[in-house]
Image (cartoon, helix red, strand yellow):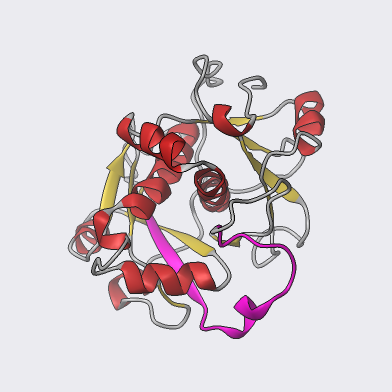
Amino acid sequence: MSSEEQQPQGGAAQDSPFRDGADERDERAQYVLPMVVSLERAAPPARTDALETAARAVLVMLCDPRSTGDGEWAGAMRAWQDARIRKVVRRARGAEWRRAEALPGITVEGAAARVRVFPPVPLDGWPKDLARLQVSGTELDDPAPPPPPPPGTPVLWVNPHVDMSAGKTMAQVGHAAQLAWWELDDGARAAWRDAGFPLAVRTADPEHWAKLLVGGVPVVRDAGFTEIAPGPTVAVAGHTAIGGTAHGR
């Protein structure tokens, strides 16, 4: 599912690409970060596992040496982050997944989930082996309610009042992870990276969600391209270094 970031609620880092309101980004060439989740019929991953793996995949892409400095993907990453930040999640299985893995990118694995993230491409410039993959059909469930996150774990919170497919939610928590990354200073980023990007994705209970929205942490507002109307806050980026807390469900 596709998704576009909106502005953070709190004060973003000075070099953050997440800036308020309409600006010159809208006039620039628009790019998208492709993500593919492996969905084998016999053993699909649990929903929360897929969401958390997608969020980590975005963070791994952001700090990969190929994405920074003079890296081979750095130009595409800069063009993507200089425009509107978009992510699209597609699904693959069998030969589709093997073809996706043959393309330049990074595969991140969770407990059972596998998500491959690729360097950004123009909106109309998808590689054919990715363009042919389906966006719909990413309905996943958790076999049991996920446990409370371990103390100190960064938590990406999902709106309890908005119904989204797993693919759509994967894009949104990817946005939330990226917002959290841009809010951190260099020391906090390095610590998170060196720890392997521990994080949890949970749906907040309604009372906690209301508190999060006035808590000054970064929020993701949907641009309304797919599934839901534009405007609602769909995810919140929680991290201990930016005031995130681990309560909810």
Residue 122 vs residue 159: left or right?
A: left
Residue 60, compared with residue 69, is above or below; it is above
Residue 99 in view in this figure: yes
Q: How many marks?
A: 0
Locate residue 166, reporting x and y percent.
53, 46
Q: Quadrant of the C terminus?
A: top right
Residue 169, compared with residue 45, is above or below; it is below
Locate residue 219, reporting x and y percent.
68, 46
Locate residue 97, reporting x and y percent.
26, 56
Residue 231 vs residue 168: left or right?
A: right
Residue 132 in view in this figure: no
Q: Nearer the viewer, residue 162 or 149?
A: 149
Residue 233, compared with residue 119, is above or below; it is above
Residue 90 vs residue 68: left or right?
A: right
> Residue at (52%, 34%) from the top-left corner?
141
> Residue at (56%, 57%) from the top-left corner?
16
Q: Nearer the viewer, residue 81 or 37?
A: 81
Residue 19: within the magenta? yes
Q: Quadrant of residue 6?
A: bottom right
Residue 169: within the magenta? no
**Magenta highlight range:** 16-36
Q: Nearer the viewer, residue 28 or 172?
A: 28
Q: Quadrant of residue 49?
A: top left
Q: Nearer the viewer, residue 50 or 197?
A: 197
Residue 156 vs residue 227: left or right?
A: left
Locate residue 143, reporting x and y percent.
49, 24
> Residue at (21%, 59%) from the top-left corner?
95
